[in-house]
Image (cartoon, grey):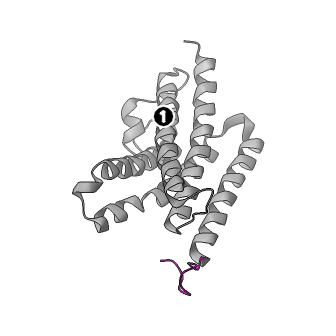
Amino acid sequence: MDTQVLWYLSRASGLVSLALFTATVVLGLLTAGRLGTARFPRFAVQSLHRNLSVLSLVFLSVHIASAVLDGYVEIRWVDALVPFASAYDPFWLGLGALSLDLVLAVVITSLLRTRLSPKVWRGVHLASYAAWPVAVVHGFAMSGPDTAWVLGFDVACVAAAATALHWRTTRVHPDTTVRVP
């Protein structure tokens, strides 16, 4: 396959992954804050959160595979999993690997959720809130020649997540006068 096609595929799938993971984080915050309306009940928010999470993983897989298969720079499969082991740009690629490892921990524990205590599952699931900003920094640092518009894209993703986080941390549940924990 043409190296240039793989490069564009890697870039595009990385940006789509970031958009989908941002939407997943936003929906996770809204779900945790018990968002629900008559037209969009809480179970629908949770279902969308779950489905976007899976779709995010598909695009992330394409992003990783196309980066590894692209022969322009040497990135090995192990570099996608072991943080900071890559010969090419070890720190910035390592952030991507670290983010992937955190996401994999969340996926694995979510698949095993019925066999784990809620406390353990929740503790690991909170790692997704660390995986996302690490992925944002990885993406910006690896942005390449189109840095200006990628920066704008990153800022939009950060603004969306920050808005959801603000809503989540200041939310008062309508049935009480207590903030939602």
Confirm whether the magenta stretch covers residue 165.
no
* Residue lying at 58% horizontally and 33% vertically, measured from the top left: 13
* Residue lying at 64% horizontally and 25% vertically, measured from the top left: 8
Give x and y (percent) for residue 64. Answer: 48, 32
Question: Is 136 or 70 nearer to us in this picture?
Answer: 136
Residue placed furthest toward the bottom: 177
Give x and y (percent) for residue 17. Answer: 56, 40
Question: Predominant secondary structure in magenta?
Answer: loop
Position of 13 with respect to 108 (left or right) is right
Q: How many marks?
A: 1
* Residue lying at 62% horizontally and 39% vertically, measured from the top left: 15
Q: Is residue 125 above or below residue 49?
A: below
> What segment carries the magenta color?
171-181
Amino acid type assigned to the residue bearing label 1 in the image:
Val
Residue placed furthest toward the top: 1
Confirm whether the magenta stretch covers residue 180.
yes
Question: Is 80 or 16 nearer to us in this picture?
Answer: 16
Residue placed furthest toward the front: 38
Give x and y (percent) for residue 54. Answer: 46, 41
Q: Indicate the secondary structure of the residue bearing disc 1.
A: helix
Quadrant position of the N terminus in the picture: top right
Give x and y (percent) for residue 11. Answer: 62, 32
Question: Is 43 or 4 nearer to us in this picture?
Answer: 43
Q: Is residue 178 above or below residue 147?
A: below
Q: Callout 1: 10 Å neighbours few (<14), some, many (20+)? A: few
Question: Is 37 or 11 nearer to us in this picture?
Answer: 37
Position of 33 with respect to 150 (left or right) is left
* Residue lying at 57% horizontally and 21% vertically, measured from the top left: 6
Q: Which residue is mark 1?
A: 58
